[in-house]
Amino acid sequence: MGLLVEGKWVDQWYDTKSTGGKFVRTVTQFRNWITPDGHAGPTGHGGFKAESGRYHLYISLACPWASRTLIMRKLKGLENHISISIVHPLMLENGWTFSDGPGVIKDSLFNSDYLYQVYLKADPNYSGPVTVPVLWDKQTNTIVNNESAEIMRMFNTAFNNITGNYDDYYPEHLQSEIDAMNDFVYPNINNGVYKTGFSTNQAVYEKEVTKLFAALDKLEEQLANQQFLVGNQLTEADIRLFTTLVRFDAVYFGHFKCNIKALVDYPNLWDYTKRLYNHAGIAKTVDFDHIKQHYYGSHKTINPTGIVPVGPDLDWKL
């Protein structure tokens, strides 16, 4: 774990002392958009036209934020148009690396040893965290965007005329409902497991874990009468929730002490998660070995021995 400070790598853990034991997520800094014609998107500047083979995606199979983009790449038929690198699951003193290991795909662009070297290619004086996903432009040699929610939106529409895939996971008539659901799921569940697991104060932990399970209870009730979070179709809201739920019993329940209930104790949420897991190739984007190795092996302040549990033995068949 670490970050870059004016282009220099510094190995340090999350700061919770200055926040009273609370985990506060940093804001991503590269916020340009790929668009069909190269005009500027909602943020950043223009010049990033959707073209086959032009862009490269750096991800971790362990990271729920990166996994969102990998799922969207799969669903939108972008695998032959956007190349990929997959980091090693362990994130230790050098951050994300391209060390040898099962499932690792090396950096084919720069042959980097560490992901922070890719950030420095974009900005030699960069200061900030070195996170995945990273969407790289091979033409201008820079990072387009490292915000997963925005990369999902780009993948959803920008390449439609290239792929012929017009499936829409953020349809106009559902956008306000999707936005509202995202605004509920992100702080309470997606980031809620981290605020619970990385808290270093008992009162903070108990507050965050209570909020997390109140949110899960609410969705359990909602999914009693519907198949998806919004409308009658799979949307980005489902994908954003899924990447947290699919990791819940494997890592968050034990490692992050999110243990009031297991996901399998929620009949509707568990059925919902299994249905998404078995939907259109999504299962191929999930690697439980990477997931468990990363969390249990990387977070030495939480799990000093680095021992990775054998279980849980979950049945993902419908």
Image (tube, rainbow, N blue to C red):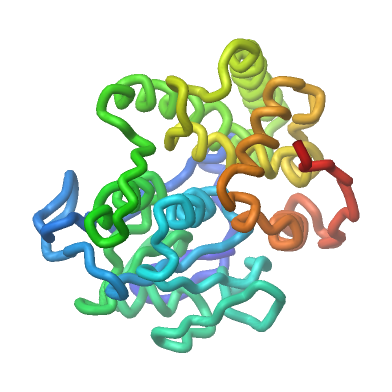
Up the image or down, 77 lies above or below 208; here it is below
Q: Residue at x 43, y 37 (%)?
A: 236
What percent of the width, then of the height, locates residue 214?
Answer: 64, 16
Q: Nearer the viewer, residue 206 or 217?
A: 217
Instruction: Tell me if residue 65 can be seen.
Output: yes
Q: Residue furthest front?
A: 164
Q: Nearer the viewer, residue 57 or 77?
A: 77
What percent of the width, then of the height, locates residue 265?
Answer: 81, 24
Q: Nearer the viewer, residue 159 or 151?
A: 159
What percent of the width, then of the height, locates residue 110?
Answer: 41, 87
Up the image or down, 125 lies above or below 68; here it is below
Quadrant (top left, top right, bottom left, bottom right) of the C terminus: top right
Q: Quadrant of residue 178?
A: top left
Q: Residue furthest bottom?
A: 111
Q: Residue at x 27, y 48 (%)?
A: 157
What percent of the width, then of the height, locates residue 77?
Answer: 41, 58
Q: Quadrant of residue 120?
A: bottom left
- Judged left or right of residue 177, residue 132 is right
Q: Residue at x 37, y 71 (%)?
A: 56
Up the image or down, 47 lies above or below 161; here it is below
Instruction: Tell me if residue 21 can be seen.
Output: no
Quadrant (top left, top right, bottom left, bottom right) of the N terminus: bottom right
Q: Residue at x 50, y 73 (%)?
A: 85
Tell me how many marks there are.
0
- Judged left or right of residue 85, residue 56 is left
